[in-house]
Image (cartoon, rainbow, N blue to C red):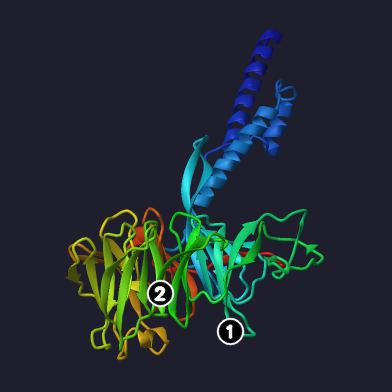
Amino acid sequence: MSRKSAYVIFSIVLVFLILVLTFFFFLYERNSTGQYNLNGSLSNSIRDFLPFGKNAPLQNLSNLNQQITTQTNEATTSEIIVPALRQISTAPVAGAELIDSTSTVIQDMVKKTSTNQTIRFVDRSTGHIFDTKKDNMSVEEISNTTIPKVYESFFSSNPDIAIFRSLDEGSDTIVSKEAYLAKPTNSTTTDSTQATTTATSSIVAPIIYSGTPYVTKTSILPTDIESMAVAPSSQRFLYMFSDASGGTFVLSNLDGTKPVKLYSSPLGQWLVDWPNEKGAVITTKSSGIANGISLLVDTTTGVLSKIASGNGLTTLVSPDLSQALVGTSGDGSVPYLNVVTLKNNSTINLSFRTLPEKCVWSHTEKSTVYCAVPENIPVGTYPDSWYQGLVSFTDNLWKINTSTGVSNIAALFTKGYGKNFDAINLQLSSDDTYLIFTNKSDLILWGYNLKYQLGGSAGVTTGAPTTSSSTTSS
């Protein structure tokens, strides 16, 4: 064989070996997502072996790998299964709120804006504030400023501002405070006493702040507010206090400034609700052995119009002020649920036996409510026995058309999930896809994904939260 023929054969064999090595390189380096890892040890050794390997710029390859990693992480996050019925808090809550939020995600190498709901809640014993997403089991403590024994919290249309209510331990006086989230200044913060602004506040040395992204600052509101409600779309609230002459209703800013007297009554026991900026609802405190009345109050003029009356009366007016769920107990032994159209005072009797405070109006469907309906009503005087904790309910969730009376089961908690709930403080997300509620028996916060009605395949089990919190309390 001539030297020229041998050189040709050697060149062919060399090219063949290079092709074989290249093939096995791509076969070896492709990961489970179908992408290729261009920074692996085998790929680097081949770069060194091939003539163009050592001189090829690696910056573009590194950026490509980062983009691939981001996509992989996004895909992994979206595949996390969150149970349809989910335990959100691990301890009793003072209140909670569903907040619309937007975030940017990368899909198919393109940035897209995604809308999600954040669930914000307040720990009852400490006043610490937590956030979680409806599609994520992680719970983040966003403020660890300790405000002990917050029995009620009312969030405003600005989710960073709320009203906290507690009892003064020395006098049992009801104490109300405007609470708002603030960024720590100069990496320091104060404890709950220092964070409270009063006319006689004294200077206290700050302590080093660590852990949560916010601190909670508070300012004192008028004392002995007996009942209150926050405006649905403005930074105001309506509150009621009583004295020897009866009850007085006052409108003011959330910080207590610019108070305006709205209405006075010779009666001193009232509950307050504010479903629409134009109209608030005041209802006498309910008892199955006493006649009560519910009134719609024009928040501009103070003009009153009657909603309903009766024994054991409680109400829940729709956000558009067109209808009201009316609960009465007749002789006090059984709670009945009716719907009153406020324009013409017509009434539809619903077949359900539940209380309006166990319901929530839909945001997307007119004349639609979701109600927690007890499987059985124990013997008692209603709503007194239930308010006092003498009886407890075992609820399932129903979706009710208040114009036709037609209803559908939305969740069989007792059969589909094996859980007993006495649900209160129901809230719906703005798109009606998610429901949060508090279990009255232990004040634990729960969430339910309404996409999985009747306990669909994605939600047969329940889930408990995983909490991310600071180890340092302010």
Question: In the image shown, does 268 or 387 lie closer to the viewer?
Answer: 268
Q: Are marks 2 and 1 in contact (CB under 8 Å)?
A: no
Q: Can residue 33 be seen here?
A: no
Q: Quadrant of residue 72?
A: top right
Q: Quadrant of residue 28?
A: top right
Question: In the image shown, does 208 or 141 lie closer to the viewer?
Answer: 208
Considering the numbered disc 1 on the image, is that residue within a helix, a strand or a loop? loop
Residue 123, placed above or below residue 288: above
Q: Which residue is located at x 42 percent, y 87 percent?
A: 388
The residue labelled by disc 2 is 271
x, y percent for residue 167:
58, 79
User: Would you call the spot at circle 1 few (<14 residues within 10 Å), some (14-19), or many (20 or more)?
Assistant: few
x, y percent for residue 6:
68, 14
Q: Amino acid at mark 2?
A: Leu
Residue 62, placed above or below residue 80: above
Which disc is residue 289 wearing?
none
Q: Which residue is located at x 55 percent, y 66 percent?
A: 163
Q: Does label 2 or label 1 sit earlier along the sequence?
A: 1
Residue 346, placed above or below residue 151: above
Q: CA distance from mark 2 to mark 1?
A: 20 Å
The residue labelled by disc 1 is 172
x, y percent for residue 215:
67, 61
Q: Is residue 197 left or right of residue 355?
A: right
Question: In the image shown, does 301 or 378 lie closer to the viewer?
Answer: 301
Q: Quadrant of residue 416?
A: bottom left
Q: Amino acid at mark 1?
A: Asp
Q: Quadrant of the N terminus?
A: top right
Question: In the image shown, does 15 or 81 lie closer to the viewer?
Answer: 81
Q: Quadrant of the C terminus?
A: bottom right
User: Would you call the spot at circle 2 few (<14 residues within 10 Å), some (14-19), or many (20 or more)?
Assistant: some
Considering the numbered disc 2 on the image, is that residue within a helix, a strand or a loop? strand
Q: Can residue 360 be seen here?
A: yes
